[in-house]
Image (cartoon, grey):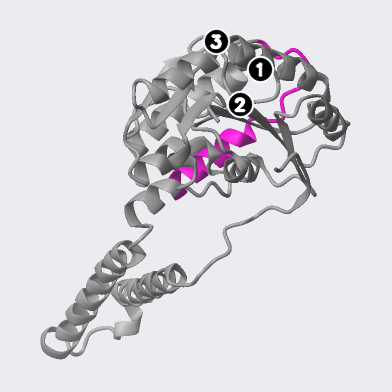
């Protein structure tokens, strides 16, 4: 199979038929063998009913339905597990991503040898204050922190080698940072392509300003995981050692001062240096404990699946 198109969605019943027809037309025009995988992330409208109808009429349409809304990362993870194509294309279901981009993205993976091609919505039709400016700031911070030089990390239109999606774990809200996860997994041939962005045709956006707050918090998480995910003791142990050295230094100073230099002076407990020493030693010990716990967790087998599937369509 040439292409798997993975489409996570939430309450997009109005756009699904048009999106399906558009994708199918592109596939047939370019003679691609393909599958379209819709992941219904707990929709409360008739999205799943529309997907079932599409699946009945087109054997290439497959569906995954979650019991509730688990988030875009979990939806992508489920789609990646199911995908069989040599190239996996992800796109949003709101018609803001253009399926006409698929052939070029496919060729960049197959012919040019890239592991991942990320879309870049250079010209956007979103609100400047609510999306454009925060997005630019977010992308700048992501570039500086991750070392992956992309202009639009959050673009839903991306193309991947099959091997890549089978070797990364997309959980939490890490869908924004799949290029970083790919780089950490050893897939370094990452590039971007300017893609057409279209104004939303149906419904309203599911994301608000809070997604950028969550995005920056996730950025800190992935920076930590990239640098210390396999060796948390290197970070927490270093911080703990610094705190303990400061604490023991003040304690030594107080002891020498009290015994040899000023034995008749104030009690040690009346001096601010005592509380600095006490606090830093306690904090240092806590850092060491955090490092040990991190190392123990790394060695504990964890269940990676964080979603519950209610129904499949055309699994075989």
Whether residue 66 sits left or right of residue 109 in the image: it is right
Q: Secondary structure at mark 1?
A: helix
Residue at the disc numbered 3: 196
- Image point (37%, 47%), residue name: 185
| Total tally of numbered discs in the picture | 3
| Vertical relation: 59 (above or below) 283 | above
The reply to whether residue 121 is in sight is no
In this rendering, the label closer to the viewer, 2 or 3: 2
Q: How far is disc 3 from disc 1 in space, using C-alphas?
A: 15 Å
> Which callout, 1 or 2, points at the residue further toward the start of the chain?
1
> Which callout, 2 or 3, points at the residue further toward the start of the chain?
2
- Image point (62%, 40%), residue name: 79
Q: Position of residue 159 (x, y in %)?
A: 49, 27
Q: Nearer the viewer, residue 21 or 144?
A: 21
Tell me the tag on residue 34: 2
Q: How far is disc 2 from disc 3 in space, using C-alphas?
A: 22 Å
Q: Quadrant of residue 43?
A: top right
Do the residues under discs 2 and 3 have CB atoms within 8 angstroms? no
| Vertical relation: 181 (above or below) 245 | above
39 magenta-colored: no
Tell me the tag on residue 23: 1
Q: Position of residue 278 (x, y in %)?
A: 35, 77
Q: Secondary structure at mark 2?
A: strand
Do the residues under discs 1 and 2 have CB atoms within 8 angstroms? yes
Q: Position of residue 26 (x, y in %)?
A: 62, 12
- In magenta, the rendered stretch is 199-221
Q: Position of residue 38 (x, y in %)?
A: 71, 33
The reply to whether residue 230 is in sight is yes
Whether residue 5 sits left or right of residue 262 in the image: it is right
């Amino acid at each position: 199979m040439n292409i798997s198109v993975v489409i996570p969605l939430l309450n997009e019943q109005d756009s699904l038929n048009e999106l399906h027809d558009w994708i199918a037309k592109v596939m047939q025009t370019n003679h691609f063998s393909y599958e379209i995988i819709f992941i219904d992330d707990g929709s409360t409208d008739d999205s799943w009913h529309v997907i079932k109808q599409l699946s009945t009429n087109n054997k290439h349409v497959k569906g995954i339905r979650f019991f509730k809304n688990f988030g875009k990362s979990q939806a992508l993870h489920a789609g990646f597990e199911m995908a069989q194509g040599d190239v996996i294309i992800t796109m949003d279901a709101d018609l803001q991503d253009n399926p006409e981009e698929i052939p070029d993205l496919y060729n960049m993976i197959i012919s040019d040898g890239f592991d991942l091609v990320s879309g870049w919505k250079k010209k956007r039709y979103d609100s400047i204050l609510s999306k454009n400016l925060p997005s630019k700031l977010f992308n700048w911070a992501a570039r500086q922190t991750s070392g992956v030089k992309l202009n639009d990390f959050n673009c839903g239109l991306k193309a991947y080698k099959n091997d890549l999606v089978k070797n990364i774990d997309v959980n939490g809200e890490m869908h924004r940072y799949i290029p970083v996860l790919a780089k950490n997994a050893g897939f370094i041939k990452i590039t971007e392509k300017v893609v057409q962005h279209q104004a939303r045709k149906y419904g309203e956006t599911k994301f608000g300003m809070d997604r950028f707050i969550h995005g920056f918090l996730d950025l800190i998480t992935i920076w930590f995981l990239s640098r210390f995910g396999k060796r948390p003791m290197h970070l927490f142990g270093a911080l703990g050692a610094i705190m303990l050295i400061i604490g023991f230094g003040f304690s030594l100073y107080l002891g020498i001062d009290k015994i040899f230099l000023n034995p008749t002076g104030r009690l040690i407990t009346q001096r601010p240096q005592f509380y600095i020493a006490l606090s830093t030693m306690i904090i240092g010990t806590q850092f060491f404990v955090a490092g040990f716990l991190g190392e123990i967790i790394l060695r504990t087998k964890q269940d990676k699946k964080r979603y519950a599937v209610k129904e499949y369509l055309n699994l075989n």
